[in-house]
Image (cartoon, rainbow, N blue to C red):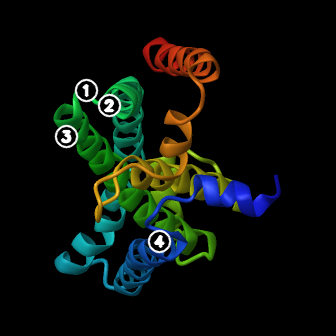
Amino acid sequence: MNYQKYLAIIIPKAGLKHLKATYLTWAGVGFIGSYVATALDKYAEVAYAAYYTNAVNDAVGYKFWILLSVIGLLLLCASLPLIYLAEHLNRFEITVKKLRQLTYTFFVVAFDEGALMIGILVANFLHASEKVTLLASKSFLFSDIGFFVLLALCLANTLLWLLGEAIYNHDDQQVSGLINWLIKTPLKFALPAYLVISGLFVHLITDQ
């Protein structure tokens, strides 16, 4: 199986153009907002300028992004068995649809928050100002916002989009991409993998 077939499996119906457009929208807002705050920074003694400069720190919600992501992943773990039953036994369709829609909402909001956060960090990476650097370092608890940190965040955020759009397509309200592939995998392979991965994930969350 070549990479094009793998891409066809994992890409949801929304398509990569939607991913690109959403990333550019939210990351662009964060990026431009950081530079506006930087421009106002030289007027920091003025009350309104200081207010908007500090707004950059409020927008970098790393912990909130983690919270949304964890809730989405826990909902996904709870949803998958019901999605499988709805697909193969035609049961719980209404309940499953509502649960998929809720899971989709958490994933998509987390993705939007992550894209905004990444835009701010890209501005920081390009040395928008010393204040932005300090704000980002304080919020993220990273000593250095480097290329590989940004890449890791982009990959993790993209995974949230892939899962969210795969579990609920806004147009036809069906599953696609990774979720469609998972529920069509034979149960003898899918069930052990689901139990191991879900168990490890829940243990990781509760252990912290």
**72 left or right of 10 in image:** left
- Residue positioned most to the front: 89
Q: Residue at x 35, y 66 (%)?
A: 56
Taking depth in this image into account, of 11 and 142 the one nearest to the observer is 11
Few, some or many C-alpha atoms within 10 Å of disc 4 (few <14, some 14-19, many ≥20)? Answer: many
Q: Is residue 97 above or below residue 9?
A: above
Tag 2 and tag 3, C-beta contact below 8 Å? no
Name the kind of residue labelled 1 in the image.
Arg
Residue at 18% across, 78% down: 48
Q: Nearer the viewer, mark 4 or mark 2?
A: 2
What percent of the width, then of the height, locates residue 100? 29, 41
Q: Whole-Å distance between the Cαs marked 1 and 4?
A: 36 Å
List the residue tagged with mark 1.
91
Q: Which residue is mark 3?
A: 98
Disc 3/disc 1 C-alpha distance (Å): 13 Å
Q: How many marks?
A: 4
Of 30 and 40, which appears nearest the observer? 30
Q: Which residue is mark 2?
A: 86
Q: Residue at x 36, y 32 (%)?
A: 83
In this rendering, would 177 be left or right of 193?
left
Q: In terms of secondary structure, where does tag 4 sit? A: helix
Amino acid carrying mark 4 in the image: Tyr
The mark nearer the N terminus, 1 or 4, is 4
Instruction: State the image coordinates of residue 95 (x, y, percent, origin top left).
Output: 18, 32
